[in-house]
Image (spheres, grey):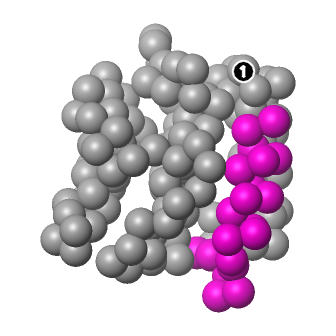
Amino acid sequence: MAIAEINDKDFEDILEVAQKFNGENNITGCLLFHNQEFLQILEGDKQVVLFLFERIKKDKRHTHVSLITQGEIQNRSFTGWNLAFQKWCFNTMADVKNVLSLQELENLVSVIDKPTTAKKMFAHIAKGIIDSNKRFM
């Protein structure tokens, strides 16, 4: 859950630091933000991802961080994206640099290779966010 005071500058800072770290450490993934909650999937070397997750848990811009699932994958779903990001706030779409459009995210979710529990859960939650935001567009 994001802190109530989170703002656009916080998101820009998160993206800048995450994209730099992820690029340097061959981490790929996607981060969604909706209704004050973050949803993230990370792909990469297990030890680096676990180290990154510990850093994420200590970040003061959110609380109640939960690991939903983890596991090994054969192929990455977010190849080439050291951090895809989408932020939805109620019925408006926020414009942040390097943001996926709703259509791009919908296309991604529809073609994600879904053999793992993590990918299935991420795709299911992301699809729910997409569907709820389509009603406002």
The percent position of residue 47, horizontal first and vertical second, equals 77, 27
Viewer can see residue 47: no
As drawn, is 25 to the left or to the right of 32? right
Q: Is residue 104 magenta?
A: no
In front here: 80 or 96? 96
**Is residue 21 left or right of 133 when viewed as pictured?**
right
Residue at the (69%, 78%) spot, across then down: 6
Describe residue 53's horizontal placement relative to residue 75 as left or right.
right
Q: Which span of residues is magenta-colored?
A: 1-20
Magenta-span inclusion, residue 11: yes
How many numbered discs sit on the rendered protein?
1
Identify residue for label 1. 26
- Residue ID at (59%, 43%): 98
* Residue 28 on image: x %, y %: 61, 29
**Which quadrant holds the N terminus?**
bottom right
The picture quadrant where one finds residue 51 is: top right
**Where does residue 34 sit, x and y in percent of width and height?**
45, 69
Determine whether 59 is above or below 67 in the image. Answer: below
- Please state the horizontal and vertical placement of residue 42, each as a whole percent of the image: 59, 36
Type of amino acid under label 1: Asn
Identify the residue at the far top of this view: 74
Residue 77 position by quadrant: top left
**Which of 3 and 87 lies nearest the eye of the viewer?**
87
Determine if residue 36 is in view: yes
Say if 132 sits above or below 96 in the image.
Answer: below
Within 10 angstroms of label 1, few (less than 14), some, or many (20 or more) residues? some
Going 33% across and 77% down the picture, which residue do you hit? 91
